[in-house]
Image: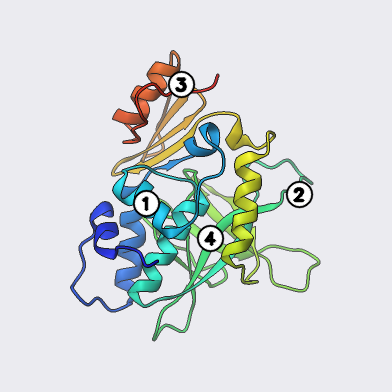
Amino acid sequence: MTLDLDAYLARIGRPVAADPRPTMEVLRSVHRAHMLGIPFENLEPLLDGAPSLAVADLEEKIVRGGRGGYCYEQNTLLAAALTQLGFRVTLLAARVVVGAAPGDIRPRTHMLLRVDVEGEATPWIADVGFGSHGALLEPIPLVVDAELPDTPRRHRLVHAPHDGPLELWELQAGKGGYWEPQYEFTLEPFEAPDFEVINWHIATNPRSPFRQAVYAQRTLPGRHLALSGRTLTVTADDGTVEERELAGSEEVLRVLAEDFDVHLPGGTVLPG
């Protein structure tokens, strides 16, 4: 099935010309509009098990149903849209390193996209599914040490040391006076069935963090919202952070609806 592109673009608030060309301006604007228009959330793994990655189901849930999703859903949806817009898209997998202890080796569980743009010598990395304040707002060129000022954020890609046969790339986010590693990846292509397996593991393994608590993120002009369990963190563009604890499940559901624009059916009970 092909994605209803007009409905997707309306969902993210990004109208384009009737016959848009796959240019860098289109790639940047669609990526940023998606980040500002669709929240990150793990509620389906928390409540119902593994979400479907079929384009038809993603269209029903996220585009028409007004929900969000986590990385496999978000980036599968973006990949479908970009492909229909004429871009060449390759699926990649990364290890999340932000927050990892020294020597901790995590599995490759994060999905991201390589996008090739006709007429551009450099490929680009696109990623609208990284549920973190360190996430990209715009695609970043696949160039070592080239800084991306995706205002109000900053990012760069570097080569990380390792013993493998392929170059290891690391996405870093600017945090005040230092660069914070976010995730690492190689350019080995992955296919949709690979992420079906990873998605099932992350959504159903009882030890997965996405099975333990609510995680939601929303990027808005001027601020970023993060909900982890019952802790709501608001980070302003100037770096100011406000944090508060929500009272219980009912307040969590209210905040999800009012602040994150994530609406769950009446009678939904969140664990914990």
Question: CB under 8 Å between callouts 1 and 2?
Answer: no
Which dot, 3 or 1, sits closer to the camera?
A: 3
Mark 3 burial class by Cα count in 10 Å: few <14, some 14-19, many 20+: few
Mark 1 burial class by Cα count in 10 Å: few <14, some 14-19, many 20+: many
Q: Name the residue under label 3.
A: 269
Three-letter code for the amino acid on which mark 4 is drawn = Leu
3D distance between C-alphas at marks 4 and 3: 32 Å
Q: What is the secondary structure assignment of the residue under circle 4?
A: strand
For residue 55, which numbered disc appears in the image? none
Q: Is 93 positioned to the left or the right of 58 in the image?
A: right
Mark 2 burial class by Cα count in 10 Å: few <14, some 14-19, many 20+: few
Residue situated in front as seen by the camera: 154 or 215: 215
Q: What is the secondary structure assignment of the residue under circle 3?
A: loop
User: For residue 265, what is the image quadrant?
Assistant: top left
Q: Is 47 positioned to the left or the right of 84 in the image?
A: right
Question: CB under 8 Å between callouts 4 and 3?
Answer: no
Q: Mark 2 points at which residue?
A: 105
3D distance between C-alphas at marks 2 and 3: 34 Å
For residue 35, which numbered disc appears in the image? 1
3D distance between C-alphas at marks 2 and 4: 19 Å
Q: Residue at 53% x, 60% y: name it.
A: 112
3D distance between C-alphas at marks 4 and 1: 14 Å
Tell me where residue 67 appears, x and y as whole percent: 36, 42
Which dot, 2 or 4, sits closer to the camera?
A: 4
Whether residue 121 is situated above or below residue 157 in the rendered picture: below
Q: Is 183 positioned to the left or the right of 51 in the image?
A: right
Name the N-terminal-most of marks 2 and 3: 2
Name the N-terminal-most of marks 4 and 3: 4
Q: Mark 4 points at which residue?
A: 112
